[in-house]
Amino acid sequence: MVAVKKKNLKMFTLALLFVITITSFLLNYTNSLVMVTWDPKQIVTQLKKLMKYSQRPCSCSSCVPELGLSFWFDERFNQTVQPFLTTRNTFIPEESYKWWLKLQGEGNPKNINDTIKELFEIIPGDGEQLLERDVSRCRRCAVVGNSGNLRQSQYGQDIDAHDFVLRMNRAPTAGFESDVGSKTTHHFVYPESFRDLAENVSMIVIPFKTLDLRWIVSALTTGTINFTYVPVPRKIKVKRDKILVYHPVFIKYVYDHWLQHHGRYPSTGILSVIFALHLCDEVDVYGFGADSNGNWHHYWENNGSGGAFRRTMVHDGDFESNITLTLASVDKIRFFKGR
Ligand SMILES: CC(=O)N[C@H]1[C@H]([C@H](O)[C@H](O)CO)O[C@](OP(=O)(O)OC[C@H]2O[C@@H](n3ccc(N)nc3=O)[C@H](O)[C@@H]2O)(C(=O)O)C[C@@H]1O
Ligand SMILES: CC(=O)N[C@@H]1[C@@H](O[C@@H]2O[C@H](CO)[C@H](O)[C@H](O)[C@H]2O)[C@@H](O)[C@@H](CO)O[C@H]1O
């Protein structure tokens, strides 16, 4: 009898040791700094945490897509909306299409299905692999806006330490490395904001009209399109498999869910931030913030037209800024305010 009891006690001790070892390993693995002790209460707490962590969508200390932490965020974030237009993803519902067509008042647009078909005869139209989830991954992204608050910020090294660095429009890095970094993995453009990119950079084209999709084809082939509402480059030197296309339905999702119809349509900055929430496990935001007059000044130039969007009401900069700050306040992004 005593021998059996001793054996059971030994088994129990061994089992407990095993659980503690596994718990400690997994908690460390999930970047959680928790001291593992023999206190039964702590063991139960840690086991509960372990159960919670095992359902987490990534291995960072916090994961953007994790729901149940902010009602505000959960109400807006919809993981099922696809950020990229791909060959498997070309359907645009009538309502979204009609909304999108009005963004830049395109008269007499070419048929959208024919346009998309032609586009994917020229570029591969993939991008799905970027959206695959992996619970053991911690993908850290930096979204770098164009604000003058980056000047003298010395954020360069921090920005470059991210897995993905997303930039936009005409933003340069050369000459500004110590403040904005030198790494770029993805660069958002539209025809009117195109700039030459290094070979290894993925160019994400945001189409605000049918002509923007046709411009991609033209710029890689015949070079016939050289004007939209301003002159645009006839030809671009970008490898075809480095071109990704932002989904028009995703633009509407940002406008409906996140901007709640403020402004005429979302700016490139807010489109990039919400896009990053869908692709990344952690999102750090740099270079967002107007100057003291509310103008969108740039870090590389003294752009006198920084307040143009205010006059044309195309974007609601104040509302967009509130969204970014709220995302930071509910710990879904980290916001680096610059100088
Ligand atoms: C005159 C004009 O049309 N300016 C627009 C320019 C312009 O078309 C491009 O720079 C051309 O390359 O583009 C925009 O934006 P822009 O290229 O200025 O900036 C990109 C995004 O960074 C954020 N930003 C910028 C400056 C600043 N002081 N504070 C900021 O928060 C914003 O989120 C902004 O969206 C655009 O595409 O959104 C919006 C701007 O309104
Ligand atoms: C200053 C302004 O409102 N210009 C608009 C122009 O808006 C710009 O469109 C860009 C995409 O093409 C991008 O969204 C940028 O942030 C906007 O400022 C277009 O709407 C254009 C359409 O014809 O009309 C210009 O007046």
Image (cartoon, helix red, strand yellow):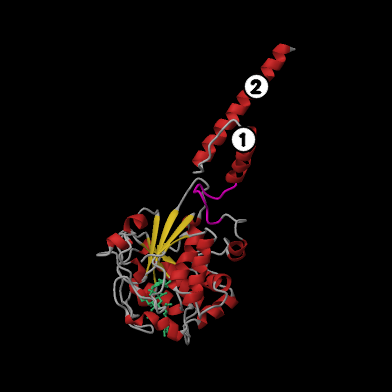
Q: Which residue is mark 1?
A: 43
Task: Provide residue 233's location: percent of width, then percent of height.
Answer: 31, 77
Q: Earlier in the sequence, mark 2 or mark 1?
A: 2
Q: Is 182 above or below relative to 14?
A: below
Give the quadrant of the C terminus. Answer: bottom left
Give the quadrant of the N terminus. Answer: top right
Q: Is 267 above or below relative to 105?
A: above
Q: Nearer the viewer, residue 21 or 278?
A: 21
The residue at 60%/56% (across/down) is: 69
Q: Nearer the viewer, residue 198 or 40?
A: 40
Task: Provide residue 309's location: percent of width, then percent of height.
Answer: 43, 81
Which one is closest to the eye, mark 2 or mark 1? 1
- Ligand 2 located in image quadrant: bottom left
Type of residue at label 2?
A: Met
| Magenta highlight on residue 61 | yes
The residue at 32%/58% (across/down) is: 156
What main secondary structure does the magenta stretch of the protein show?
A: loop
